[in-house]
Amino acid sequence: NAGVTQTPKFQVLKTGQSMTLQCAQDMNHNSMYWYRQDPGMGLRLIYYSASEGTTDKGEVPNGYNVSRLNKREFSLRLESAAPSQTSVYFCASRVTGAAGYTFGSGTRLTVV
Amino acid sequence: GESVGLHLPTLSVQEGDNSIINCAYSNSASDYFIWYKQESGKGPQFIIDIRSNMDKRQGQRVTVLLNKTVKHLSLQIAATQPGDSAVYFCAENTGTASKLTFGTGTRLQVTL
């Protein structure tokens, strides 16, 4: 039982390049989330998907897009990476009725 | 591991002592609160949660206290161990779809 799996674990991009961060969960959770974590700022919500087929903006959605491909997978896309998007990105999922999220191990992204 | 929270407040505790980590939250309408533990290079891990209609909840070696009057949350760890060394985040559930808003975190250092 893998839980929440994120790929890749590390990535370096040049300014203007695009990439997609992948996230998959095998726990049959309904809701999925993307957060970014910057030093001294805790975790900030980028986008979330309350259920399959729906996505909504979080606190810091600018520069990102998401796709809830199916119940298991929720991807985050950077169309034109900027140095301000250098961060650690975490995907999380939650089953309806539960309080806590299950987090993946993160993707460390550096934009140069 | 990544540099998570370079400027985080730090609590230094001797092994075997009790630790108290505090958190102030902002939204009086939040209906539940969660404490997470994050070790270096890993995603946040659920520790314990508390509903807004409670003022205390106990788990294994941990106790969470909620004071809604002053919007304050604390996590008490009994008999702190070296494995407790990590960054601890409080989070509050705001609104529908269980979107969690995270605090900036406290680093707990356990000295031998």
Image (spheres, rainbow, N blue to C red):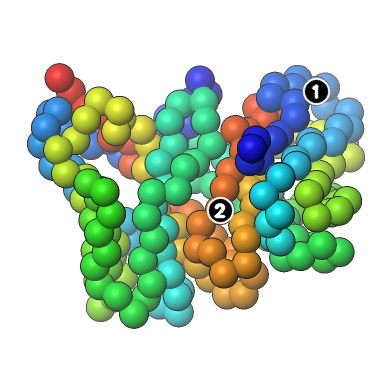
Q: Chain of mark 1?
A: A
Q: Quadrant of residue B63?
A: bottom left
Q: Is residue A28 visible?
A: yes
Identify the element where label 2 is drawn: loop
What residue would you read off at disc 1?
Answer: A13
Verify CB contact (< 8 Å) between mark 2 and mark 1.
no
Q: In screen coordinates, is B4 left or right of A8?
A: left
Residue farthest along the front direction in this orientation: A1
| Both labels 2 and 1 in a single chain | yes
Which residue position holds label 2? A101
The amino acid sitting under disc 1 is Leu
Up-down: is B86 above or below B24? above
A26 displayed left or right of B79: right
Closer to the chain start, of discs 2 and 1, is 1
Q: Chain of mark 2?
A: A
The number of numbered discs placed on residues in the rendered structure image is 2
Which quadrant would the C terminus of chain A be assigned to in this image? top right
Which residue is pictured at 70% across the width and 22% down the height? A10
Q: Position of residue A91 (x, y in %)?
A: 66, 44
Rendered residue at 71%/45% (across/down): A26
Residue A40 visible, this angle? no
Characterize the local packing of mark 1: few (<14), some (14-19) or many (20 or more) Cα atoms within 10 angstroms.
some
Task: State how far apart marks 2 and 1 are (Cα).
Answer: 29 Å
